[in-house]
Image (spheres, rainbow, N blue to C red):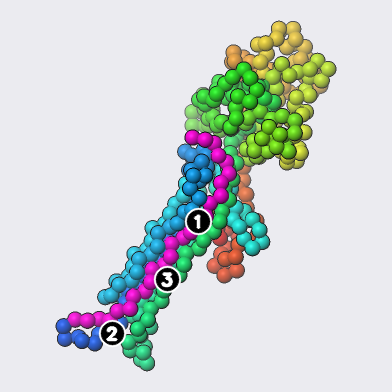
Amino acid sequence: MRFVDEATILVKAGKGGRGCVSFHREKFVPRGGPDGGDGGDGGSVILQADAHLLSLYDFRLKHAYEAQNGQYGQGSQRHGKKGEDLTLRLPVGTLVFAETAQGEQLFADLSEPDARVTVARGGRGGKGNEHFKSSTMRAPRFAQPGEPGEELPLRLELKILADAGLIGLPNAGKSTLISRISAARPKIGAYAFTTLTPNLGVMINETAPDKRMVIADIPGLIEGAHTGQGLGFHFLKHVERARFLVHILSIEDVDENDPWAGFTLINEELSLFDPELALRRQIEVINKIDLVDEQRCAALKARALDEGKNIFFISALESRGLEDLTRQLWALQDEIAPHAPLRRTGKLPEDDDGEIDDDAQNVKVTYVR
């Protein structure tokens, strides 16, 4: 399946069923009273985060989604059946934006597995004619029509949720590293831009098997990434919600005069894309030390120590130095709090009806509108 992280859809809730106009008839009761049943409510459209999904590809294939209409009321006070709700499953980390009169507004952040949010409510069913009888109107010959369901255009944007995000220049060995420390099996090649879409891997703590860490392997970034060079901003958004970053530099890209220039270049791109990203905690890693002799590696370690830099020197290919690195990964996971769900921005039209709690803006609740 292709990795797709943006999609635009139209959701429409079901229409309420029409109320029934009916009068009671049976033997010896030629003129019974009104007994028309109510129409059923229309089904609602619900979005639910699914931890098993990693792409919005299905929503590129189909754009319109409609819940079931409520059934009509019938005689003998038989009410119509409620329309079935339509539940659309989205990857964890999906942001839902709605078009409003004020422009595009954040509707929900599905940042937790199984989080649910109702985005379009079904219309109410119409009342049957039995509701309109009175002392002055003994035989009402009318009933209410069902109300239309809500209809809303939505823009979906997936931002991968991970504990650690692997970043760096192309061909730095990020995919090899994630394949060594997790069960992920990404495509690996000895050329730049082998990885074209983010990969997720789960690392399990050997001393505590119930403890896990989600790691995102982000495609290589280049100078100008914040402006979209090399599809940079499509990749950078996937590290916005990582707890911390693992910044990897190949020893092949280390210059004798300025050995840390590769780190500086990517950090500048992070800052230009989002200043907060530049402040995110990082673990700096020099990879592929198997390509140089011990003397050069020792010289780089000494220089890093003199400059007060805590850099991990590893060979992901040969699994050298990974024990100290993974120990640091687990330490940062314990130290840094996970991503907090984004809160809704602006007001939606229905917020003025007095039925919506403006404080209930994250998707831990069923309704956020």
Give the alpha-carbon distance from disc 1 to disc 2, as whole Å.
41 Å
Three-letter amino acid code at the position of disc 3: Gly
What is the secondary structure assignment of the residue under circle 2?
loop
- The residue shown at (47%, 38%) is 52
Secondary structure mostly seen in magenta is loop
Please give the residue where the numbered disc 3 appears in the rendered image.
Answer: 146
Q: Is residue 328 left or right of residue 210?
A: right
Give SS at disc 1. Answer: strand
Which is nearer the N-term, disc 2 or disc 3? 2
The residue sitting at 73% across, 23% down in the picture is 310
Can you tell which quarter of the image residue 201 is in?
top right
Q: Earlier in the sequence, mark 1 or mark 2?
A: 1
Mark 2 neighbour class, 10 Å CA radius: few under 14, some 14 to 19, many 20 or more? some
Instruction: Assess whether mark 1 and mark 3 are in contact (beta carbons under 8 angstroms).
Output: no
Residue type at tag 2: Gly
Magenta stretch encompasses residue 9:
yes
Q: Tell me the number on the disc at residue 11.
A: 1
Please indicate, yes or no, whether residue 116 appears anywhere in the rendered image.
no
Q: Position of residue 271 (x, y in %)?
A: 76, 37
Camera-side residue of 321 and 180: 180
| In the image, residue 32 above or below residue 65 | below
Closer-to-camera residue (135/155): 155
The residue range painted magenta reads: 1-26
- The residue drawn where x is 77% and y is 12% is 299
At which x and y percent is residue 115? 50, 48
For image coordinates 41% across by 67% down, the residue present is 16
Q: Nearer the viewer, mark 2 or mark 3?
A: 3
Label 1: few (<14), some (14–19) or many (≥20) C-alpha neighbours in 10 Å:
many
Residue found at the far left of this picture: 27
Residue at the disc numbered 2: 33
